[in-house]
Amino acid sequence: MALACNQWMNTKINEPVLNTFEQEIYHDFIADLTSTKEVSMTVVLKEKLNNVYSQRDYDNWDGEDAYKLSYAAYLQAYTFIDSIKNLPQPQIIPYPNGHIGFDWKIKKLRLDASIVFDGKGSFMYVILAPDGESYGTELHNTKTQEKFIKYMDMLVNGI
């Protein structure tokens, strides 16, 4: 009994006892919490999107006959978040037609931009910048998403 008690007393309290799989998940979780600003913004933005979606997953969520947010639009928006690491954090906008969008308003650059996911495989965008405006509807795929991000990166970061 004394030996067991002594071993227990010498165990480091801050180290959880985990199997190999749990250790990998735990270390990935800690890495996400302690890594760069970009990962933190991604994690925070995904959590905000989860909250926006879960609070509006029923019809009439706005009291004015809005459709519930489309789960497919939520998935489009969720996967898009990983690609915007170099951009400022956007505002998440739920639309009464069930779409989900992101808005950027960057006053110092005089830039307003929006992208809206329809849940049917397309997105609409509007970018108002000092050098002009750009808008349209695109099929949501890797190529069109990268094109939008590249243009936004150029406007915001000069890349």
Image: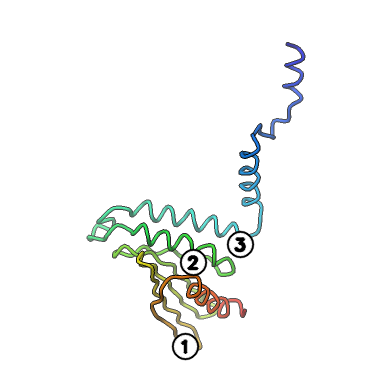
**Residue 89 spot, x, y in % from top left:** 52, 65
The residue that disc 2 covers is 90
**Residue 150 spot, x, y in % from top left:** 55, 77
Q: Which mark is residue 132?
A: 1
Where, quadrant-wise, is the N terminus in this rendering? top right
Mark 2 → mark 1, Cα distance in angstroms = 21 Å
Amino acid type at image mark 1 = Gly
Q: Is residue 47 above or below residue 144?
A: above
Residue at image location 36% in from the left, 62% down from the top:
94
**Residue 113 spot, x, y in % from top left:** 46, 75
Residue at image location 59% in from the left, 57% down from the top:
40
The residue that disc 3 covers is 38
Q: Front-most of 41 and 122?
A: 122
Tell me, yes or no, whether the two marked residues, 2 and 3, touch with CB atoms within 8 Å: no
Q: Which quarter of the picture shows residue 16?
A: top right
Mark 2 → mark 3, Cα distance in angstroms = 13 Å
